[in-house]
Amino acid sequence: MNSKSLEPNCCVAYSVVVPVYNESQGIDHCVHQLIAVMESLGEPFELVFVDDGSVDPSLSILARHCAQDPRIKVISLSRNFGHQAALFAGLQHARGKAVISMDADLQHPPELVKSMVELWRQGNEVVYTVKQAAKAFSPVRRFAMWCAYSIIRRTTGLQIAFGQSDFRLLDRAVVDVISKMPEQRKFLRGLVSWVGFKQVALPYELADRYAGSSSYSYWKLFRLFFDGIFSFSIVPLRTTLVLGFLAASLALFYAVFSLTAVFLGWRVAPPGWLSTTMVVLFLGGAQLIGIGLVGEYLGRVYEETQQRPVYIVRRRIGFDALDDQR
Ligand code: UDP
Ligand code: MG
């Protein structure tokens, strides 16, 4: 972020925010598709592309589009900050009365924007899309996704639908609230669900990537999953407490049983090392999990206290007063 004012003046009806990371193969097509769809709506719009530290020619291609069309704006981040941070940068710079966010690879069909706008005009303040992933993912991935969404829903209490993505429309009121959220680790799906307002779901078929390959590795997905849980829930900490109580109760029960057995002269198995090892392992494991969980939250508290910006802008192009000359 920067010191210059980013207060939106809402002079356009729609903003489309598109995070871009190494999308040079398909970005031209994306720009043309988006312009065609947005022009068909018949109201002023802007396209805000956020180059998230691409190492391919994505930025120069976008800068060229920007020079030819004043409706196109580009934010170039100083390095790769990740999809969520790039989206957040775009939201903070968008000026539309409604802000649509979508991926640059055209997996989010641009034509759907028309239906989103229609639902927004009917008074909905958040139009989130839900991908019908049946065809798009393997059964294993679908099962993993189902587990991830269910765990997030149950632990956080947020109503995040299975297959909900970052393809959505937000009313200006919602964008203003979200773009002022101070937390460092952004899980926008969670934040959008958390802020409330009038929300509606719109199903869509996930298309194949127009070009290139996904930069979301399984590790990044895993991190997003943990961000979803740890940013919105302390249930894991509570679970450890419950586990601790359970383990302690079991140990107590076992102690009482053993003592009774000794007094009554029962021939219980000699105090074998197996049972001892099991108890030690179980308690040791439970303690390590507990420490790990506390560490995870502590790490997040540490990150928040550092107050580093969520992203750093290297250059802005097409924003007039906010433009950075280079
Ligand atoms: N993206 C980004 N920064 C990153 C990774 C991805 O801005 O570090 C962008 C990418 O260019 C695309 C969107 O985020 O527009 C979604 O990324 P991708 O298609 O790789 O993810 P997937 O659709 O496979 O989940
Ligand atoms: Mg994609």
Image (tube, rainbow, N blue to C red):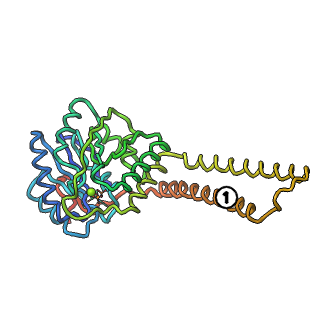
Which quarter of the figure is the N terminus placed in?
A: bottom left
Image location (x, y in percent) of residue 39? 9, 44
Image location (x, y in percent) of residue 146? 40, 48
Near mark 1 (Cα within 10 A), the count class, few <14, some 14-19 or many ≥20, is few
Does residue 281 lie above or below 119 as drawn? below
Image location (x, y in percent) of residue 6? 28, 48
Residue 186 shows in this picture: no
Total numbered circles: 1
Q: Residue at x 12, y 62 (%)?
A: 64
What element does badge 1 sit on? helix
Determine whether, in the image, residue 242 is placed left or right of residue 269: left
Residue 60 shows in this picture: yes
Which quarter of the figure is the C terminus placed in?
A: bottom left
Quarter where residue 121 is shown: top left
Which of 57 and 302 lies nearest the eye of the viewer?
57
> Which amino acid, by three-letter code, is at mark 1?
Phe
Determine whether, in the image, residue 122 is placed left or right of residue 147: left
Q: Residue at x 11, y 54 (%)?
A: 32
Residue at numbered disc 1: 282
